[in-house]
Image (cartoon, helix red, strand yellow):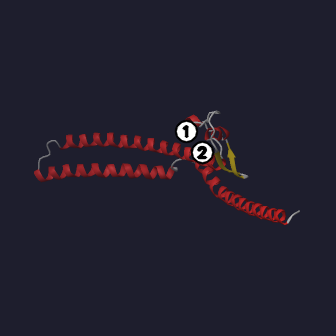
Amino acid sequence: MSRASQQTAQYTDEERAAINATNQQLLAQQSALGNTVVPAYQNMLANPGYSQSQQAAITGATQGSLSSAFDALAQRAANRTARTNNSAGFSDTLDQLARSQAQTQSQAAGQNQIAFANRSRSDQLNALSGLSGLYGVDANMLSRTLGIPAELLGVRARVTPASSSSLRYGFGPLGLNFGF
């Protein structure tokens, strides 16, 4: 073997060793990331949305602020009655305030329930998207594997036609994955 051939072989071996070291480093980083992120995504998927205590706090804050506003209006009507020493219409005003308060609080409670459902759905979608991004798997297929109907999450499978060529990549249990 000539000196140039030996030198080329040596450079090739050194380059291969550097690439292998880089691949091992990427694999270790991916594994560490997976060990940290995957349980968080799985927890988000299993427990989407606000907890019961968070929902109670949100509902309490909403209803409490509405009650305070209507209590202030009732107090204002009482002060007017005391100031003018005329109670005419005071009962009607309180009745109207009570009706308005009931309507407003029921609308706020309904909006809270919608917000809770949207947050739950959003968390499930984010968890599926995150897991599918880590493993380079279609979120629709992942949701079926986990037993969650993708239709409920609004997830659509992204199917690339066979005629178009596109490169897809992602991280999987064995490192960086490539596909067409």
Residue of label 1: 153
Name the residue type under label 1: Leu
Quarter holding the N terminus is bottom right
Quarter holding the C terminus is top right
Q: State the image coordinates of residue 129 (x, y, percent, origin top left).
A: 58, 46
Residue drawn where x is 83% and y is 62% of the image:
5
Left or right for 138, reference 102: right
Q: State the image coordinates of residue 88 (x, y, percent, origin top left).
A: 14, 42
Q: Which mark is residue 1?
A: none
- The residues bearing labels 2 and 1 have C-alpha atoms spaced at a distance of 9 Å
Residue of label 2: 128
**In front here: 39 or 72?**
39
Q: State the image coordinates of residue 46 (x, y, percent, origin top left).
A: 61, 47
Residue drawn where x is 55% and y is 47% of the image:
126
First in sequence: mark 2 or mark 1?
2
Residue drawn where x is 28% and y is 42% of the image:
98
Name the residue type under label 2: Leu
- Contact between labelled residues 1 and 2, with CB atoms less than 8 Å apart: yes
State the SS at label 2.
helix
Q: State the image coordinates of residue 167 (x, y, percent, origin top left).
A: 64, 44
